[in-house]
Image (spheres, grey):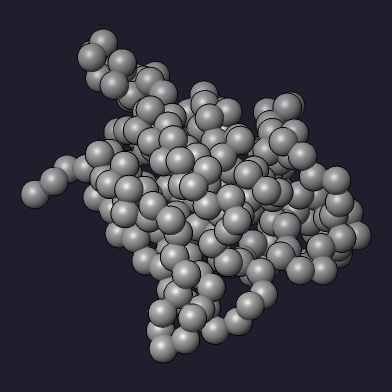
């Protein structure tokens, strides 16, 4: 059995009728390129609508180890070989192969304007989710986000526990009201339609990250990247709604 990390990719394509669609040019080569580093499951389907979302890739990486065993070993008592293997693991084994394959696919399909809409890395103990907030946002920022995640991971520990979910990025919604009497600040991901937050940029990947903890009274926190502070917050996300 292969011990490669698994990668599932899904997307919607322009329909031609009778279940057929206009697929990416070079989609077979795209899958082959990724298969060097991953067990790949690639699923493109003809959409039943012609709205947004065409040729936007949703990617889920499944790694059958914990974050501690994969990344935190670099700061522990492991030997030099294990520490070297852990160093920049995300960038070397996930970010670089995905980015290189995607750039090739994009260059062959400029008319379809492909993008990575969402990238989720599922470890045994943490789901790490990166959202696209503008065209090519993930592709442009994947390296710096991965470097920061590995460097700051130990700072996410609250009450002796790592978060179960990490969301990158989230935004402070100054107009939203907290859902409970504590009136905590509200942070959320960007909405696909009717979004009121404007002028997003690369800098927003390095401002606020949402963290969700199980088994704690204060389950939702926001990590302020620049100050390294953890604050209690109301957190809105597609996956869980409002806590």
Q: Is residue 25 above or below residue 100?
A: below
Residue most extreme to the left: 1
Q: Residue furthest right?
A: 175
Q: Residue furthest bottom?
A: 18
In the picture provided, is 236 more to the left or to the right than 219?
right
Residue at 81% across, 63% down: 195
Tell me if residue 220 can be seen: yes
Q: Is residue 68 above or below residue 61?
A: above
Residue at (58, 66) in percent of width and height? 54
Measured from the top left, where is residue 55 in percent x and y?
54, 62
Is residue 175 placed above or below 160 in the rendered structure?
below
Q: Nearer the viewer, residue 223 or 19?
A: 19
Location of residue 205 (image quadrant): top right
The quadrant the C terminus occupies is bottom right
Q: In the displayed structure, does residue 176 sit left or right of residue 109?
A: right
Can you give x and y, in whole percent of width and height, for residue 133 in the image? 69, 50
Closer to us: 166 or 221: 166
In front: 50, or 39? 50
Residue 101, x across and y down, in percent: 41, 41
Closer to the camera in the image, 45 or 95: 45
């Amino acid at each position: 059995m292969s011990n490669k990390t698994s990668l599932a990719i899904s997307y919607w394509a322009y329909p031609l009728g009778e279940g057929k669609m206009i697929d990416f040019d070079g989609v077979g080569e795209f899958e082959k390129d990724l298969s060097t580093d991953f067990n790949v499951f690639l699923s493109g389907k003809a959409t039943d609508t012609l709205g947004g979302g065409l040729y936007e890739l949703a990617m889920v990486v499944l790694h059958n180890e914990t974050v501690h065993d994969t990344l935190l070993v670099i700061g522990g008592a492991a030997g030099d070989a294990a520490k070297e293997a852990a160093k920049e693991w995300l960038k070397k084994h996930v970010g670089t192969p995905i980015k290189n394959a995607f750039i090739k696919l994009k260059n062959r399909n400029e008319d379809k304007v492909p993008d990575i809409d969402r990238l989720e890395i599922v470890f045994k103990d943490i789901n790490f989710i990166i959202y696209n907030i503008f065209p090519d946002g993930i592709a442009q920022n994947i390296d710096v986000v991965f470097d920061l995640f590995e460097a700051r991971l130990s700072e996410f520990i609250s009450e002796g526990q790592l978060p179960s979910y990490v969301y990158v990025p989230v935004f402070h919604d100054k107009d939203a009201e907290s859902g409970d009497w504590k009136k905590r600040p509200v942070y959320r991901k960007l909405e696909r339609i009717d979004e009121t937050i404007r002028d997003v940029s690369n800098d927003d990947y390095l401002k606020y990250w949402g963290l969700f903890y199980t088994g704690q009274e204060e389950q939702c926190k926001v990590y302020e990247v620049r100050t390294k502070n953890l604050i209690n917050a109301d957190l809105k996300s597609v996956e869980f709604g409002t806590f």
